Image (cartoon, rainbow, N blue to C red):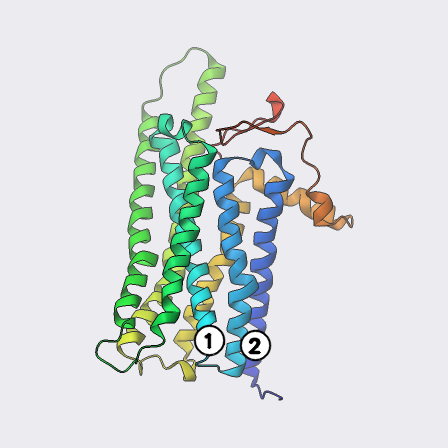
């Protein structure tokens, strides 16, 4: 069957394909960087890699399905149900990862002794909790399609506001409060730096405090992108469940398309933020690009880790030569 497509629709599909390419490429570089650079083998970067994987799901599954549904105008059926459920899963996983990263950085800055006591098991439990919670909430969605949407007891009118709260309002408030707290702690540390006669020690402390401040700025920027990118989507979702005529799916209104583009664009911007704000990731990206330029494959790039790398059991740090040890608080 040949699909008739206007120039406007063709441009929209072209934009979605380009966005899909950026999402997959950027987040693949984050994952490849983690395996190619031993300095990134820390708990914080493990969160970021899992974060990148959730965004990869958006580019590899959610966005292609959205393009197909956009072309075929599929409204109901198993494919539509799967798309909506998977879209919720990838979206919540991405949002929950941002929240978890912010909380972990808050512990590192404001509760360093507690953060130092965190083991590999703590990070594993946190990641499992993120994915399990996102999966559980997304799994509820298909069961709701069996109910009548026109009844006053429509369960979507409970589920959708709940989804908006746990996926946007709650994380937005929590991450904002955490970022404000991080800024306050960083400002207090800067204003109360001890007077140390040893210039080398003084520079080391000041450098670490400035690093924490950069971390706070990075998290603030990511939080702002999150709030802007997801606002229209959750607004459309919440309003449409109470007023279906306001945003009819079959008409694919401009605001609905715009909200989906913003939603998916957040998955494309996250790795760009990492590369711009994190010096270690930026250097690794450049090295990977250099290898690609010389014709090397990603598989070859993943084999450059030093052979003397060992995982310290019960800890989130990897042991290498002293000159290659990285403080885990770098983001």
Whichever of labels 2 and 1 marks the residue nearer the N terminus, that label is 2
Which mark is drawn over residue 2?
A: none
Instruction: Using a 10 Å C-alpha cutoff, classify the residue at mark 1 as few (fewer than 14 neighbours), some (14 to 19) or many (20 or more).
Output: some
Task: Pick out the residue farthest to the top.
Answer: 197
Residue located 40% across and 35% down the image: 213
Q: Badge 1 is on which residue?
A: 80
Could you tell me residue 159's position as x and y percent? Answer: 29, 66
**In the foreground, 129 or 113:** 129
Residue located 27% across and 72% down the image: 155
**Dot 1 lies on which element?**
helix
Could you tell me residue 196's position as x and y percent? Answer: 40, 13
Q: Quadrant of the N terminus?
A: bottom right
Residue 22 in view in this figure: yes
Q: Badge 2 is on which residue?
A: 11
Residue 221 in view in this figure: no
Check contact, mark 2 vs mark 1: CB within 8 A. Answer: no
């Amino acid at each position: 069957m040949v699909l008739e497509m206007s120039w406007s629709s063709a441009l929209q599909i072209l934009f979605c394909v380009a966005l899909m390419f950026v999402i997959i490429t950027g987040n693949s570089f984050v994952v490849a960087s983690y395996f190619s650079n031993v300095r990134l083998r820390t708990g914080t970067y493990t969160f970021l890699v899992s974060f990148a994987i959730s965004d990869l799901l958006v580019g590899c599954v959610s966005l292609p399905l959205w393009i197909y549904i956009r072309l075929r105008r599929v409204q109901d059926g198993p494919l539509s149900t799967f798309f909506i459920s998977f879209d919720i899963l990838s979206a919540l996983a991405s949002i929950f990862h941002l929240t978890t990263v912010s909380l972990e950085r808050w512990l590192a800055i404001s509760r360093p002794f507690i953060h130092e006591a965190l083991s590999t098991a703590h990070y594993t439990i946190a990641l499992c909790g993120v994915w399990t919670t996102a999966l559980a909430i997304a799994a509820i969605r298909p069961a709701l399609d069996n109910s009548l949407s026109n009844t006053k007891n429509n369960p979507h009118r409970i589920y959708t506001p709940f989804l908006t709260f746990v996926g946007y309002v709650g994380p937005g408030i929590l991450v904002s409060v955490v970022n404000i707290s991080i800024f306050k702690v960083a400002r207090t540390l800067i204003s109360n730096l001890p007077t140390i006669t040893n210039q080398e020690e003084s520079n080391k402390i000041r450098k670490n405090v400035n690093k924490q401040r950069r971390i706070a700025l990075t998290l603030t920027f990511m939080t702002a992108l999150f709030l802007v990118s997801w606002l229209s989507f959750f607004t459309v979702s919440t309003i449409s469940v109470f007023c279906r005529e306001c945003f009819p799916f079959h008409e694919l209104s401009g605001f609905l398309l715009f909200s989906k583009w913003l939603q998916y664009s957040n998955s494309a911007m996250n790795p760009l933020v990492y590369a711009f704000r994190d010096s270690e990731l930026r250097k690794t990206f450049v090295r990977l690009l250099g290898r690609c330029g010389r014709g090397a494959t990603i598989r070859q790039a993943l084999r450059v880790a030093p052979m003397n790398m060992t995982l310290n059991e019960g800890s989130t740090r990897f042991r290498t030569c002293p000159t290659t040890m990285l403080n885990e608080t770098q983001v």
